[in-house]
Image: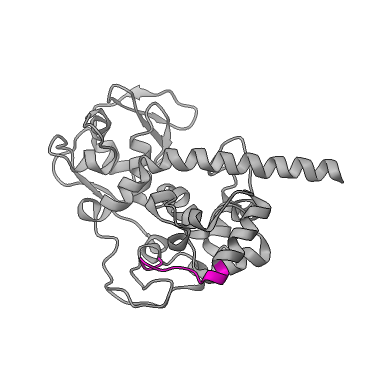
Amino acid sequence: MKQYSHFYNLQILFLFVFLLVILFINLLFSKNVIEGLQPTLGDLTTPSVKKVIPEEYKFLAPIPDGSVWTPEIQEAFVTAWQQKRDPNYTIENLKTPLAGGKTWFQWATQEEAQYYVDNQKWPYDEYVINYITDNPHFLSATNTSTPDQYAAEVPNRMIYGIFIAPQTVPQMKFFNQLFSLNYPHEAENGKFWQCTSNGTLQTKDGENGTMADNNDYSFFQSNIAGFSFTGEACNACAIPQIKISGATGMDIYNSNQNTCKFTITGDTEAYKVYTGVYGNALGTNAQ
């Protein structure tokens, strides 16, 4: 029994370190996408019709700036984190920004923090649980993890905003693929595509096909759902070739150096909830 417990603890430790590594890699790109998504790639956050947040997204709505947990919950959380994760953790650490410049107070409500204290894991909503269950390799092709394993380390909003949204929101997914050079991505109609390190579009038919250079840039519009050029078809693979000091992702796309413009549309209900279109986690109406 001790041997199993030791092995399980090693698994959790490996998962925690792995999440931190992936987190910092994603922050280099996905944070820029989130902040710059609306102006250029289509308005995902226009509150055309106010709705009650569906139960399946109950832990996705944003937490207002300035929110803090009660002193009692802060102390209880720190004690729980010390016992399970870091014996040197302090209340001051709670105020230190984590992913995306947010503290724990912006990633989880005090009710969720209390749930962590009581259960040694964060509460996950149905959407996030189902996504991880259906995509057990979504962070690694070689490692399989369960919702409970992630919930022991990462709040619901954080794992969605940093890890799941870039793989599911059409605009963010495309940009992640665009900047993943020399790596094949599945499109529609049995097609696959990739951008090479020198900015060339390559495509192939079927998973077992052979990648070949393709100068017909209408491929994007014909084979990627919701994709539409705003002008003439152009080489989107040239965008990662633009070098601007300190700029990544959307900064490069929005720069004057990029002349290849397009829009991408798609169903983004979870992202609408995450960005507060239907209100925030404390029940305030959308702006």
Q: Quadrant of residue 175?
A: top left
Q: Name the residue: 16% across, 40% down.
A: 255
- Residue 225 visible (yes or no): no
Q: Is there any visible trace of residue 247 in the rendered image?
A: yes
Residue 285, position in %: x, y?
33, 78
Q: Write the residue at 38% across / 51% down.
A: 101
Residue 223 position, x and y percent, is 33, 42
Quadrant in the picture for residue 258: top left
**Secondary structure mostly taken by the magenta-highlighted segment of the chain:** loop
Q: Residue shown at 26%/50% (left/top)? A: 36
Q: Which one is in front, 99 or 58? A: 99
- In the image, taking residue 107 as reference, residue 118 lies left or right, namely right
Instruction: Look at the image and say whether residue 70 sits in the magenta stretch.
Output: yes
Asked if residue 124 is positioned above or below residue 172 in the image, the reply reads: below
- From the viewer's side, name the closer residue of 176 and 92: 92
Viewer-nearest residue: 229 or 34: 34
Extreme residue toward the right, this view: 1
Report the side of 54 relative to 279 (left or right).
right
Residue 222 falls in which quadrant of the image? top left
Magenta stretch: includes residue 123: no
Relative horizontal placement of residue 98, taking residue 247 as reference (left or right)? right
Measuring from the top left, give residue 203's x and y in whole percent.
36, 29
Q: Nearer the viewer, residue 198 or 79?
A: 79
Q: Which stretch did the figure color magenta?
A: 62-73
